[in-house]
Amino acid sequence: MEKELMKIKDEVATSISSISDKKELIELKLQILGKSGKLTNLLKGMRDVPAEDRPRVGALVNEVRNFIENAISEKEKYFADIELQNKLNNEKVDITLPSKGIKTGALHPVSSMIDRFVDICVNLGFSVVEGPEIESDYYNFEAVNTPKSHPARDMQDSFYFTDNILLRTQTTAVQARAMQEMKPPFKIIVPGKTYRNDSDATHSPMFNQLEGLVVDENVSMADLKNLLSVMMKRLFGEDTKIRFRPSYFPFTEPSIEVDVSCPQCHGEGCKLCKGSGYLELLGAGVVNPKVLDFNGINSKKYKGFAFGFGIDRASMLFTGNTDMRSLFKNDIRFLKQSR
Amino acid sequence: MKVTYKWLKEYVNINCSPEELAEKLTKSGFEVEEMFYQNQYLHDVVVGKILKIEKHPQADRLVVCQVDIGDKTTQIITAATNVFEGAVVPVSLPGANLVNGINIQPTKMRGVESNGMFCSGHELGIDENYFEGAGVDGILILPNDMKIGQPIEKALALDDVVLDVYITPNRPDCLSVIGIAREVAAILGESVKKVNLNYPIDIYSKDTIHDYIDVDNQTENCPRYCMGAVTNVKIERSPLWMRARLNAVGIKPINTIVDITNYVLVEMGQPLHAFDQSLINDSKIIVRQAKDGEEIEVLNGFSYKLDEKDIVIADKDKPMVIAGIIGGTNSCINNDTKTCVIESAVFDLKSIRTSSRKFGIRTDSSARNEKGINLANAEVGLSRALSLVSKLNCGKVVRGIIDKARDKNEKRVLNGSITHINEILGVEIPTSKISQILNSLEIENKIVGDKIECIIPPYRQDIENDNDLAEEIIRLYGYDVYDKTDNVLFKNSPITESVVNKKYSLERTFRNALVEKGFYEIMTFSFGSNDFVKKMLLNDDRANPIKISNPLGENFAYMRTTMANSLFSTAVYNLSVGNKEMRIFECAKVFKAKELPLKELPEETNILGMYVCENGFDFFNLKNVFESLLIKISDKLKLKRSSEPYLHPGISADIFINGEKVGCFGKVHPLVCKNYELPNESFYGELNTSLLSTLPEKKIVLKQVSKYPNVERDLAVVVDEEIEVGQMLDAIKSACGNLFFDVSLFDVYRNESLGVNKKSLAFNIILSDLNKTLTDEEINKTVNKVLKSLQFRFGAVLR
């Protein structure tokens, strides 16, 4: 009996390694473990084993049976794995075929620039405020220290509807509205369309401005520098630097132009910045106390600073676009690039 | 404002290069926009003398010249016909690059060597006004006494550097050489040299100014009017140095007297006007407002009709000058002028501005007069002109001047606070430095403790308060100071809370959602032609767009009253460049006047408009877009057939929330498609985001769902074609009562067997109970109720 068992075990051990497909394995399983399989038959002779030998033989039987069952199930798993592998290999797709469903569109490069900047400002405690695009001369000019016949009106050619109603030339108009309506301290950011009677590769009769205004008791030119420094870093990258140059706007005093280190060459000098390493981007300054007083904010108590820039130009700098007109042609082939 | 390096050097010691000067000016607020070396194209051009001219052996039209160029003699071949032996001429030698692009190289012409070229005035960039002979068709023949071999830039005084400086509107005093010189002096720590204002008077003559002219200043709009007289006038070419200066700054030299007036205009920023005294009737100048309808012919060759708002300089019979803007032809300096009177005045800047705009005339004079001239300048300018008359020896200055002053500028005292100035700047600037900077700007000052007392010179009308002082200080102290300050944000101010802008946020949500749905955002002009009214078949208030009174052109004249036109036009453009399919949208404003012409600001409404033309895209795809955008706002959308004239009446809907129309969408009307040349399968829709952003926020309430399985039942009924599914869905929902969970339409079937004008609709109804599994009995009862309701309300028959 024991010899027989060992023989079957050896037989299985030998034959299982030479089995090459699932069918043969099923046959082998049948031959050994089936109803009239070799092992089954042999075990029928258990009752002839003397009682004192039974525990030993029984243990051997279990061992042999376990061995055989394991061997077969291992082999079964081996075949199943191969089968799955083959199946997966056959199900392979050309992953370079185009995707299905709706292809994502894109925001306009200018408005996505506005969104970027608004996010930066909102995170710094600014509120988004808007105003009318058709504006009164009063808010657009007068309330921001540019009375009629002020020489600074030459800086901007306006589109007029009547003597006193025009397309706003600057989002600064909203500054005056905000000062009249809001209670300091406040920080506002004003995105919006502005219009000037001007059209060429770098000027569009309609363009977009972003204007920021801070009114508080203790703000200074130094705060302006720090704030713009942070904002420009977030907009153009951590290594961005800014510098101030004196300038003039009727609504700020002192007034400055703000140059930003060129986002293309990082200040090294390139074609975009004409070798200077810097690009003129913002106008800014300390709010002229006349503007505060005119709009009902006590300039003895409060100070302010303001900054503004052409968002179209900023987006052009950001994307290397050289023709402002392309922004308003809306050719889908052009817009697709900003996905 | 153009100034030259040498002109500035006449008034300030400048010990840096023009480039360094330009950088320093820019850093202190006077941006040098352009710098131009006059001699840029004049190197390797010298004065030469033609010694000998011989015929070219091989060419009839050429001659071979031996030319003395100072250190040697060289051979040059020319085709010019106005040269002669002994002629002094400009010679460009090998290496020269002339302004017209010619590069000179030694060459052989028909076998004979030529080592250069003679130049015409044109090739040197000058004309007859600048130099006699420069305008002839041929070589510029120079005066015989010119030093042979000297560089032409020296010989022709073309060796200056021109700086074009941008003068900000607050600094009209710097529209002059002297003004910029003052700034240069402040920057360099130098002082400005005195302008020569002296002129000799013939002490033996008894004549005074009153023997030549009288002035009656009748208008309030001329606060100061000064006048001097010059006899024995010599009208001739002014000397080269003066022509050179004028030419450099872009002013055409004309003759002695006119050049002097222009010279003073540039140098002192004081516009002058010279009259031929013999052409002033009664020798009396009247400064007055023009009479309505009065006409004057001026020096630009045109005539203008004046009105009471214009100021004129007149005699008793005629206006002679549009004051401060342009002179008339009837009294100007001419070749026969023997005696002239020179005006130096200040006019009301608003009047000048208005008149200059009205006539469309901008001159160097008006540009300065309309920005404001300091009253003291009038007298100084006149003295300077008279001193130049004597310097040029082109006339005898008459004793005395007339000075009709309504007002004289005095120096002003301004009291400021050092602390406040430093607070504005956010940096501590040492008081000694503050004092020094202000002194350099000729602002005398005295600092006692926190107080600073300044004496502001009359030409600095722009300095009125601490902010103005702060600017003067910081621009000369240098903005670099902020590179060294700390970077603490809002060090001394409280945190402000950011208030959410609902409209902006809503639009942003919509815009981002549309991008995910394959849309491209566009940005179009808010104005355009008004042909959209016809093209879009508009007949309501949108048919009356607001018109710009000074548009770029008729095609940019009308403010949009609808977004649809912008979307359609953009679609047309894209189709024309081959983009056949598109999903586009724009969020922008439309403008509606409450009344026309405008009396008050119009109504501005933000509209999100979208357009689609795409194979297979239909009304229901578009409906899906709107549903998914609006689901965040309201579950209670109501659709009604749209009344928009530009949409297909059968395939379009208006969207209502809480009874208000918030938008519309649908297929574009076939006539509109035709008008625009859009494909027939065009779809448009819009939402009023101004209105939507005012709606109360949608409140989300989460109810528990049943833990027992839902029950589904399908129900197919036949109804008349006109019956709308939406109402049936509502009916099913209400018939199901508490057990309702969901209902959807899954099939629409039409067949003759159903009968004429009939359709079969198949609904999938899902019932649910929170507390138990529904029994067959309950289910059947509910389905029967549904069926009854459909039969009763819509005449539905079970299929």
Image: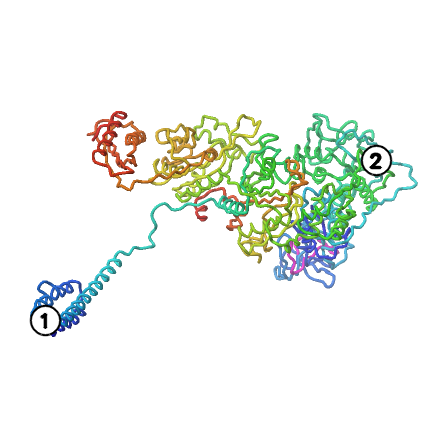
Mark 2 Cα within 10 Å, few/some/many (few <14, many 20+)? some
Quarter of the figure that contains the N terminus of chain B: top right
Disc 2 residue type (three-letter): Ile
> Which label belongs to residue B402?
2
Out of B55 and A314, give the one closest to the viewer.
A314
Instruction: Quickly name the residue at label 1.
Output: A51
Out of A274 and B2, give the one closest to the viewer.
A274
| Residue B85 painted magenta | yes
Disc 1 residue type (three-letter): Ala
SS label for mark 2: strand
Disc 2 to disc 1, C-alpha distance: 153 Å
Name which residue lies at 53% across and 33% down. Answer: B557
Q: Is residue B286 left or right of residue B494?
A: right
Residue B115 visible from this viewpoint: yes
Q: Position of residue A56 (x, y in %)?
A: 14, 72
Mark 1 Cα within 10 Å, few/some/many (few <14, many 20+)? few
